[in-house]
């Protein structure tokens, strides 16, 4: 891997808009937290766990990912995983991180929502104070659960409403179309929240259309399957809805067979507002800079193209225009 290319990508001020904090939990930290919280794991060691990172679908990944979530129990655990991700992102030249967390994995085991959000937000405050990185929490609902469960989640986090950057939708996509959450997203919009939804990762282009037309989201997470529907591509291009694309994730979960087969160049050629992100970097073999660099190598992206992708990411963030401008002044 070219050191010069990596250093160039690092030097670009960028936002990461699609990163699950639970998916940034590295195997070593996962084992440390399991010991700290007396949680039994099905793997004998961190190396054995890493050896299990072979997935043939989103669901095969989620099965392992939810096992890993069991080690996050106390406020300090949520602090530690968030602080470690933000330190790594800062080292990668990320000046704004909008990070997902799905409280339902934890509240169903009795973890108080205040401990979850408290730990994440305290880490975000410390990262801002210590590294100058701007961070926002995007609370995700799991789409395999009911819309009523999503409303319960919204209720439970409402005391932190002024600290929440937005709301998202993740989890098992196929069979759980965005239309199941139409009333929930309408409520979020009416409350003035920014929204985003995973759509078109494994699911069909029709799910991307539903996310745009029914949920009226501000961003689409993944969206790669949108290319199957030329009319939808025109709609996405005209409306400039940003897509948070995660190329290494798509390869690891077999949404595409090899990076060179990824539709990123076609998405750019179609005029879509594309951003590059890591999704679950501890599991997919790369943080955000690795995603940029491997795409640059696979597709021969120019320095200008890489800079445009980084600029897209800041423009696509949920910050106000004034806050986006101020990012240039963050150390
Ligand atoms: N949660 C964590 N990673 C995810 C992904 N790639 N798709 C859907 N939900 C997720
Ligand atoms: Zn994701």
Image (spheres, rainbow, N blue to C red):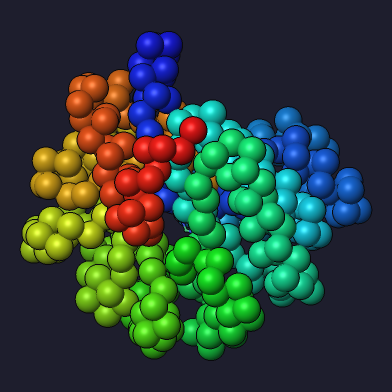
Residue 157 horizontal side relative to residue 254, left or right: right
Question: In the displayed structure, would residue 147 be above or below residue 289?
Answer: below
164 or 139, which lies in front? 164
Within the image, what quadrant is residue 289 found in? top left
Question: In the displayed structure, would residue 244 be above or below residue 27?
Answer: below
142 or 184, which lies in front? 184
Residue at the spot 70% in from the left edge and 72% down from the top edge: 113
Residue at the spot 71% in from the left edge and 63% down from the top edge: 118
Residue 143 horizontal side relative to residue 108, left or right: left
Residue 172, given in percent of the width and then of the height, sits at 48, 65
Question: In the displayed structure, would residue 283 be above or below residue 225?
Answer: above
318 or 34, which lies in front? 318
Residue 42, given in percent of the width and then of the height, sits at 79, 48
Residue 273, given in percent of the width and then of the height, sits at 21, 49
Residue at the spot 12% in from the left edge and 47% down from the top edge: 271
Quarter holding the N terminus is top left
Can residue 123 be spotted in the picture?
yes
* Label total for image: 0
């Amino acid at each position: 891997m070219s050191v010069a290319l990596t250093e160039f990508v690092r030097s670009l001020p960028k936002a990461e808009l699609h990163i699950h904090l639970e998916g940034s939990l590295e195997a070593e930290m996962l084992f440390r937290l399991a010991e700290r919280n007396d949680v039994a794991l099905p793997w004998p060691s961190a190396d054995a766990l890493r050896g299990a990172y072979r997935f043939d679908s989103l669901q095969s990944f989620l099965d392992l990912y939810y096992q890993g979530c069991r080690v996050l129990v106390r406020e300090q655990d949520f602090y530690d995983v968030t602080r470690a991700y933000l330190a790594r992102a800062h080292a990668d030249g990320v000046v704004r991180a909008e990070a997902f967390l799905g409280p339902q994995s934890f509240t169903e085991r009795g973890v108080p929502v205040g401990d979850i959000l408290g730990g994440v937000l305290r880490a975000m405050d410390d990262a801002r104070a210590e590294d100058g990185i701007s961070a926002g929490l995007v609370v995700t609902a799991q789409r395999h659960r009911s819309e009523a469960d999503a409303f319960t989640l919204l209720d439970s986090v409402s005391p932190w409403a002024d600290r929440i950057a937005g709301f998202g939708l993740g989890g098992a996509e196929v069979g759980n179309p965005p239309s199941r959450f139409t009333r929930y997203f309408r409520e979020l919009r009416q409350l003035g929240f920014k929204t985003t939804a995973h759509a078109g990762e494994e699911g069909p282009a029709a799910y991307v259309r539903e996310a745009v037309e029914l949920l009226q989201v501000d961003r689409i997470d993944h969206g790669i399957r949108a290319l199957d529907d030329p009319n939808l591509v025109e709609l996405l291009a005209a409306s400039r809805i940003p897509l948070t694309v995660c190329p290494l994730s798509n390869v690891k979960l077999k949404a595409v067979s090899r990076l060179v087969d990824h539709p990123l160049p076609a998405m750019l050629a179609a005029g879509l507002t594309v951003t590059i992100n890591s999704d679950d970097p501890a599991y997919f073999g790369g943080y955000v800079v690795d995603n940029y660099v491997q795409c640059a190598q696979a597709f021969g992206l120019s320095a200008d193209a890489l800079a445009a992708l980084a600029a897209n990411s800041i423009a696509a963030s949920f910050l106000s225009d004034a806050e986006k401008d101020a990012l240039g002044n963050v150390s």
